[in-house]
């Protein structure tokens, strides 16, 4: 049986900080190394290692980018509205 541990280590090395900041990789990267390793071993027994690596390398980063974009868009909306209002006030005062 091929152990998915090298894939896990590569993912942590490459995408660890980004996944941790975006909140998608909380299960794998919250310090529960053995818990994440057991999950990957169970997944590796059920499906091929190629599928696991595709999920970890391509799908999780894309999901984390989408989630991070949504959170950033929602959190920046009030600033955008205030900036537009301030710009209109400055434009009105200059005329």
Image (cartoon, rainbow, N blue to C red):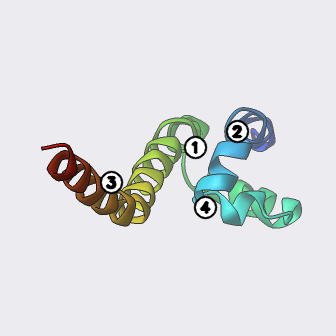
Q: Is residue 54 left or right of residue 10?
A: left
Depth check, front residue: 46 or 93? 93
Q: Within 10 angstroms of label 4, few (less than 14), some, or many (20 or more) residues? A: some
Which secondary structure lies at badge 4?
Answer: loop
Disc 2, disc 1: CB below 8 Å?
yes
Q: In this rendering, does residue 49 appear at all?
A: yes
Q: Which of marks 4 and 1 is nearer the N terminus?
A: 4
Rendered location of residue 56, percent (x, y): 57, 43
Q: Which of marks 1 and 3 is nearer the N terminus?
A: 1
Rendered location of residue 13, percent (x, y): 78, 35
Q: Earlier in the sequence, mark 3 or mark 2?
A: 2
Depth check, front residue: 9 or 2? 9
Q: In this rendering, does residue 3 appear at all?
A: no
Judge depth for marks 3 and 2 and give the one in front.
Answer: 3
Rendered location of residue 6, percent (x, y): 79, 35
Mark number displayed over residue 12: none
Q: Distance between the residues labelled 1 and 3?
A: 39 Å
Q: Distance between the residues labelled 3 and 2?
A: 39 Å
Depth check, front residue: 38 or 23? 23
Judge depth for marks 1 and 3 and give the one in front.
Answer: 3
């Amino acid at each position: 049986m091929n152990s998915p541990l090298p894939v896990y280590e590569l993912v942590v090395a490459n995408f660890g900080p980004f996944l941790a900041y975006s909140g998608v990789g909380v299960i794998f990267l919250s310090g529960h190394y053995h818990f994440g390793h057991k999950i990957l071993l169970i997944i590796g027994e059920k499906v091929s290692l190629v599928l696991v690596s595709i999920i970890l390398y391509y799908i999780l980063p894309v999901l984390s980018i989408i989630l991070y974009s949504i959170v950033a868009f929602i959190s920046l909306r009030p600033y955008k509205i205030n900036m537009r209002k301030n710009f209109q006030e400055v434009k009105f005062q200059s005329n």
